[in-house]
Amino acid sequence: MSPRTSLTRYLIEQQRVHGSIPPELRLLIEVVARACKRIAISVNKGALGEVLGSAGSENVQGEVQKKLDLIANEVLIEANEWGGHLAAMASEEMDGIYAVPNRYPKGEYLLLFDPLDGSSNIDVNVSIGTIFSVLRRHNDDPLRIEPVAESDFLQPGAQQVAAGYCIYGPQTTLVLTVGNGVALFTLEREQGSWVLTQDGVQIPPETKEFAINMSNMRHWDAPVRRYIDECLQGREGPRGKDFNMRWVASMVADVHRILCRGGVFLYPWDKREPDKPGKLRLLYEANPMGWIVEQAGGAASTGRGRILDLVPHSLHQRVSVILGSRNEVERIERCHLEHA
Ligand code: AFP
Ligand code: FBP
């Protein structure tokens, strides 16, 4: 039997052989992965750990916070703030940025996360996850180091240096990219270690499966309506094949399925909130997921352009998200062009 590759070994090889990451970034990713293990333990305890239910508060987007949202947020901050690799963190659950306190050494990286994606699924024991993105803080003048600010985080997704998610499902799986393809690590509970179980993940370019919240159909824009309508017509319609539908209501779970067997995920702009460009957040949901999908040979678009090229204007900015099998995403972009 060939020896198992641990996350540490994978990262050291990325550092040494491929030169794709510096040692500080490797250590930062290991800390995030360790925090995900701790979150997995809390998730698994469920009612026995008194972690279910609402925390009785709301986040900056007006969404009810669950106890596990706040626990996961705390775990990620506590694990990362003292390591010396980060300048600051930002999260779905915090209004502003969290600068590393002065009592700790500072580093050049910025960490963004959605600590617990799919909160509505926590209490009903359905897959949820943690999404993260790492940026490098640009500092043009090494002699003048300004205090870290929200503006440091407003970089296009194409500038991410690492991105990943951890899915807490039947298995706990960490999915990671450092710009050299996508690797999957499964948590081996007995040893408490992440074991590489798939490398070079590829999303098939064609699919017969879409993921969208169909209850919002009446609010969609014409191009999305047309695309889904053509899928629903099945083999008698213009697509000439029957489509299946899946919707978990945890982006992590829906994207993970697409990574494993193809498909397309849509959370498009809709008429419910015309002044907002979508429901999902650009910096800590769409950008990391978009980069992972691209690294696996798929595509990630707003319908009118590549997500990773967007220049963010604020920390909690929202965006229309269409990602997955490349040919399908391109077809949806064509629908948008024809309706422009
Ligand atoms: P939370 O992280 O606030 O639970 O939101 C999850 C999510 O943004 C995303 O993971 C799902 O795809 C989407 O919500 C589901 O939304 P609907 O309930 O509108 O289908
Ligand atoms: P399997 O155990 O064969 O996967 O079947 C599962 C199931 O019978 C139900 O759990 C589920 O509600 C249904 O299939 C989903 O079916 P569909 O693919 O038609 O949505």
Image (cartoon, grey):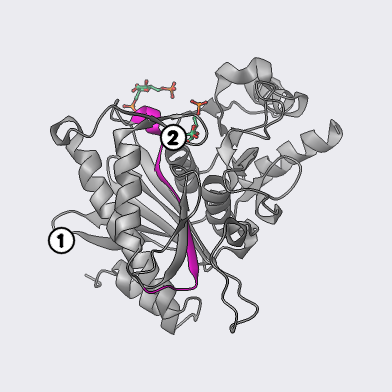
Which stretch appears magenta? 105-121
Q: Amino acid at mark 2?
A: Ser
Mark 1, other Cα within 10 Å: few <14 / some 14–19 / many ≥20: few
Q: Which residue is mark 2?
A: 250
Residue 162, compared with residue 241, is above or below; it is: below
**In the picture, which quadrant includes the C terminus?**
top right
Q: Amino acid at mark 1?
A: Gln
Which of 118 and 196 lies nearest the eye of the viewer? 118
State left or right for residue 3 relative to residue 289: left
Residue 82 placement (x, y as % from top left):
32, 67
Which of 90 and 30 lies nearest the eye of the viewer? 90
Residue 331 placement (x, y as % from top left):
73, 39
Q: Which mark is residue 199?
A: none
Q: Which residue is mark 1?
A: 191
Who's the residue at 59% across and 62% down the image? 152
Mark 2, other Cα within 10 Å: few <14 / some 14–19 / many ≥20: many
Which of 250 and 135 lies nearest the eye of the viewer? 135
